[in-house]
Image (cartoon, helix red, strand yellow):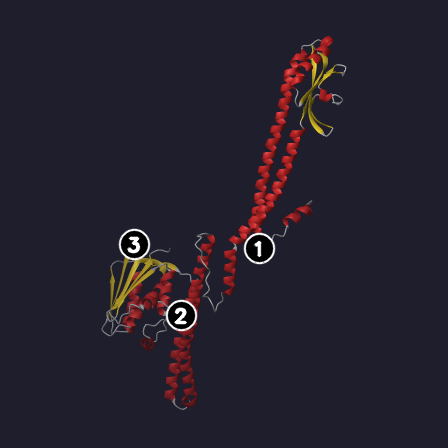
């Protein structure tokens, strides 16, 4: 028994979803059909048997009272007379009256020569390929047994109908199951056709070709939603791959320049640096400078890579925001005394954020403004509370940004003016890092700029962790 159960549990279902769904639908349909057919048969069977018993009981209730009042000495005569009176109404219900000696004293013509057991209660008997329902009751007067009354009903037709119905319901269940399997497979296969097309399209997609897209139908069903979601994912992947290619290309270009410079100075050192101390010192200083630039570039790349992989977890703490702004302005005044820095603090603001990351954020934007603001120019920093955020504004009157460049300034390695950026030693990663810091804090940023009039950066950082 256990081995049979294990076989059922370990039944190897088909691998194709269409067949699995077809089998599941067929089993459910077959189960429902069996329940309905079983219920219908059970109710009809009960109805037929109740009708048979009711018919026999009605006959008994009509005859029995008439026989119970008969004296034993006249029992035979009265029984025969009663049977003669009701024999005209015989259809499929027959009677037999037996005296106390178990001798038949009166019976229907259909029962002549038929042996019937004298057992009280209900019986089903088969005689001559026919089925009968028999009920036997005793007849007595003043406690003395006068005889027996047997009522017999021919139920061959009723039972034949029930048997044929059972066969019909069984066949209909089998046929219904097969039809359900075929129809279910056809419908499921048709329904799964878009999935097959998706699979074929997905096979054609590779890292070198992300242009393939799934066909979206107008059915507005779950598969349409899946196709749209899949296409949206491919759009994002294609965009990410292109960014990655651009990133690798730009990173290679950025690293190639300092490596070439270092290589050139090494060759100079190898040829003339051993004898010429001035050349040696110049070459060493230049190599150190380029190595530092490479180090800064690699650190920036690592920061962005960790951010992309969600490996950066801000270290939240409460601190006075106004204080770190003043520290950064002090640093910049030392670096460039030709720029006028002004800090407008409308109120003291305490922030729950990553102090070091916010410092880095401010340094990037202030340094960016300082690079492209001419001597005598102004950089104004403001901070204030706005709803549940701290609003930081960094405004300069420098060279400004063209309208078409503004959407791209946070792209990695994007440079508005390549020649100007190269002169300033920019890698094009600073603003990308700033944007990543803002995203890590669930903040927002707005950029307004106009050529030769300056740039205004507005940053919103939540006062508390979201």
Q: Earlier in the sequence, mark 1 or mark 3?
A: 1
Look at the image and tell me whether residue 322 can be seen: yes
Residue 232 horizontal side relative to residue 112, left or right:
left
Work out whether residue 185 or residue 139 is closer to the camera in this orientation and state it: 185
Q: From the image, which quarter does the C terminus lie in?
A: bottom left
The tag on residue 387 is 3
Say if mark 2 contacts mark 1, CB within 8 Å: no
Quick one: quadrant of the N terminus?
top right
Residue 58 in the image: state x and y as whole percent: 62, 19
Please give the name of the residue rendered at 37% of the width and 61% of the height, measured from the top-left corner.
Answer: 439
Residue 424 vertical position relative to residue 106 in the rendered view, above or below: below
The image quadrant that residue 166 belongs to is top right
- Where disc 2 sits, the SS reads helix
Q: Secondary structure at mark 3?
A: loop
> Residue 108: horizontal and vertical position, in percent?
71, 19
User: Residue 235 in the image: x percent, y percent?
Assistant: 43, 63
Of the two numbered discs 3 and 2 on the same chain, state the one appearing first in sequence: 2
Q: Nearer the viewer, mark 1 or mark 3?
A: 1
Count of marks, rendered view? 3
Viewer-proximal residue among 197 and 255: 197
Q: Is residue 92 above or below residue 462?
A: above
Provide the residue designation for mark 2.
Answer: 300
Q: Element at badge 1?
A: loop
Identify the residue at horizontal 58%, vertical 38% (top origin): 35
């Amino acid at each position: 028994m256990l081995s049979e159960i294990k076989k059922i549990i370990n039944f190897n279902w088909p691998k194709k979803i269409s067949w699995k769904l077809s089998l599941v639908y067929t089993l459910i349909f077959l189960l429902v059909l069996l329940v309905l057919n079983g219920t219908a048969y059970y109710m009809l069977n009960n109805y037929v048997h109740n009708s048979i018993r009711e018919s026999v009981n009605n006959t008994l209730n009509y005859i029995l009272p008439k026989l119970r009042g008969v004296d034993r000495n006249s029992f035979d005569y009265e029984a025969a007379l009663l049977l003669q009176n009701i024999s005209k109404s015989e259809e499929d219900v027959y009677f037999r009256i037996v005296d106390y000696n178990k001798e038949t004293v009166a019976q229907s013509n259909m029962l002549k020569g038929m042996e019937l057991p004298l057992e009280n209660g209900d019986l089903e008997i088969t005689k001559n390929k026919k089925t009968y329902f028999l009920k036997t009751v005793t007849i007595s007067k003043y406690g003395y047994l006068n005889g027996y009354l047997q009522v017999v009903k021919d139920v061959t037709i009723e039972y034949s109908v029930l048997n044929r119905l059972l066969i019909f319901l069984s066949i209909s269940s089998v046929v219904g199951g097969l039809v359900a399997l075929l129809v279910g497979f056809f419908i499921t296969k048709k329904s799964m056709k878009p999935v097959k097309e998706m699979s074929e399209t997905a096979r054609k997609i590779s890292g070198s070709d992300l242009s393939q897209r799934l066909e979206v139908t107008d059915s507005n069903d779950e598969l349409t939603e899946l196709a749209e979601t899949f296409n949206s994912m491919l759009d994002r992947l294609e965009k990410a791959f292109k960014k990655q290619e651009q990133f690798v290309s730009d990173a290679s270009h950025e690293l190639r320049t300092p490596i070439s410079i270092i290589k050139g100075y090494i060759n100079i050192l190898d040829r003339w640096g051993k004898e010429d101390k001035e050349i040696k010192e110049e070459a060493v200083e230049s190599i150190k400078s380029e190595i530092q630039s490479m180090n800064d570039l690699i650190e920036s790349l690592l920061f962005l890579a960790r951010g992309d992989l969600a490996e950066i977890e801000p270290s939240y703490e409460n601190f006075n925001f106004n204080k770190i702004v003043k520290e950064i302005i002090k640093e910049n005044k030392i670096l460039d005394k030709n720029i006028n820095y002004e800090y407008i603090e409308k109120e003291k603001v305490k922030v729950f954020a990553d102090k070091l990351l916010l410092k880095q954020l401010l340094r990037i934007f202030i340094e960016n403004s300082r690079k492209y603001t001419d001597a005598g120019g102004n950089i104004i920093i403001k901070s204030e509370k706005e709803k549940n955020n701290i609003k930081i504004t960094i405004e300069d009157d420098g060279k400004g940004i063209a309208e078409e460049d503004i959407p791209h300034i946070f792209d990695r390695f994007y440079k508005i003016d390549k020649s100007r950026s190269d002169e300033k030693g920019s890698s094009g990663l600073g603003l990308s890092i700033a944007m990543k810091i803002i995203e890590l804090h669930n903040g927002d940023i707005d950029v307004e700029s106009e050529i030769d009039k300056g740039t205004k950066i507005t940053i919103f950082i939540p006062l508390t962790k979201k």
